[in-house]
């Protein structure tokens, strides 16, 4: 970390797996004079500024057109300043000691409901396609003995396996989080 | 797990109850939070994400309306007739619950006296 740099990149472990961990890390970085500026590919872009401890939190919400201003205003009223948004993810910063953005479990559950449904749909769609490709591969090898179909199925299988694993992990992470909140 | 779960029943969660109480007078987001704190002597604080989530749900359930007033830049929310009926019932229900609690306490005291 050179002292003359004004921006830097910080990789993210994925908000599905370590949301609180990431927020705590961003808070520690603010104490060292690095402040979240925006989301970057698989991580965050940070900017240098005089060190000042902030706390961070994440909200997930699909905002319709025209809702954004009202949404950010209500957060500002609760002393949470909007930092950046990426799709349905919105990060806010506040002074230490500011009351949390969710004050009851029912609405905190709502926070994860939409993303959980999306992750479920994605994971199960990929799983279905992977199983279909695997079945096709087995049939073409054992029943039809068709090299073209076998190769095509093998390529499809290889491509599908790559996103299948992380999508199942994300789905499991949200499923566990919702289960913990309901307990 | 429906998005409107908590509001399709005839009962309100504590947070929704306080937000509706605040909206008996039209208010904007910041004023809703402030009023709840004043009303409850700082016992109840509603976070912005909880407030926003519930405002959206209550709009969907027609309990509150968004007043798009051109004069004020800020958006103001107000309670509908349906919301008024619900909050009146809810205040009554919570009063009954409170009375049940007091009765149970009195009964328990009576039982202890009998034992002694």
Image: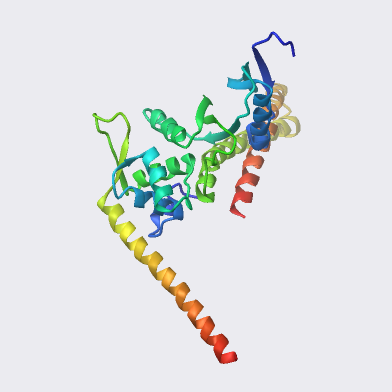
Give the residue drawn at x 51%, y 33%. A80
Compared across the picture, whether B109 is left or right of A21 comes to left
Give the residue drawn at x 63%, y 45%. A177
Q: Quadrant of residue B114?
A: bottom right
- Is A165 above or below relative to B23? above
Compared across the picture, whether A15 is left or right of A109 comes to right
Give the residue drawn at x 40%, y 65%. B94
Q: Quadrant of the N terminus of chain A?
A: top right
- Is A85 above or below relative to B85? above
In front of the other: A162 or A16: A16
Which colour assignment does the render follow? rainbow
Q: Quick one: which residue is furthest to the top in this view? A: A4
Compared across the picture, whether A154 is left or right of B103 comes to right
Q: Quadrant of residue A6?
A: top right
> Can residue A22 be seen from the camera position used here?
yes
Residue A110: image x %, image y %?
51, 44
Residue B84: image x %, image y %?
28, 55
- Counting the numbered discs, the total is 0
Residue B46: image x %, image y %?
47, 46
Residue A140: image x %, image y %?
71, 30
> Can residue A86 be seen from the camera position used here?
no
In front of the other: A123 or A170: A170
In front of the other: B1 or B19: B19
- Is B15 above or below relative to A168? below
Q: Quadrant of the C terminus of chain A?
A: bottom right
């Amino acid at each position: 970390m050179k002292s003359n740099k004004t921006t830097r990149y910080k990789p993210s472990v994925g908000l599905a797996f370590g949301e609180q961990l990431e927020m705590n890390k961003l808070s520690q970085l603010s104490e060292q004079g690095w402040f979240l500026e925006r989301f970057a590919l698989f991580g965050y872009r940070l900017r240098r500024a005089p060190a000042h401890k902030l706390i961070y939190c994440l909200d997930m919400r699909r905002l319709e057109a025209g809702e954004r201003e009202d949404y950010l205003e209500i957060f500002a009223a609760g002393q949470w300043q909007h930092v950046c948004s990426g799709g349905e993810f919105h990060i806010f910063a506040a002074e230490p000691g500011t009351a949390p953005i969710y004050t009851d479990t029912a609405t905190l559950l709502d926070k994860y409901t939409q993303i959980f449904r999306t992750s479920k749909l994605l994971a199960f769609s990929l799983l279905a396609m992977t199983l279909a490709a695997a079945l096709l591969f087995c049939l073409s090898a054992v029943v039809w003995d068709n090299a073209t179909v076998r190769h095509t199925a093998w390529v499809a299988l290889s491509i599908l396996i790559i996103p299948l694993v992380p999508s199942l992990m994300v789905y499991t992470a949200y499923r566990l989080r919702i289960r913990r909140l309901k307990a | 797990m429906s998005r409107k779960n908590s509001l399709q029943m005839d009962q309100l969660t504590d947070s929704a109850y306080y937000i509706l109480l605040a909206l008996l007078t039209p208010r904007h987001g910041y004023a809703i939070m402030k009023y709840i704190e004043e009303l409850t002597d700082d016992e109840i604080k509603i976070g912005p994400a909880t407030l926003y989530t519930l405002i959206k749900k209550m709009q969907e359930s027609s309990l509150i309306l968004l007043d798009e007033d051109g004069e004020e830049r800020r958006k103001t929310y107000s309670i509908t007739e349906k919301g008024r009926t619900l909050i009146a019932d809810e205040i009554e229900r919570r009063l009954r619950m409170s009375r049940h609690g007091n009765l149970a306490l009195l009964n328990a005291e009576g039982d202890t006296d009998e034992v002694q």
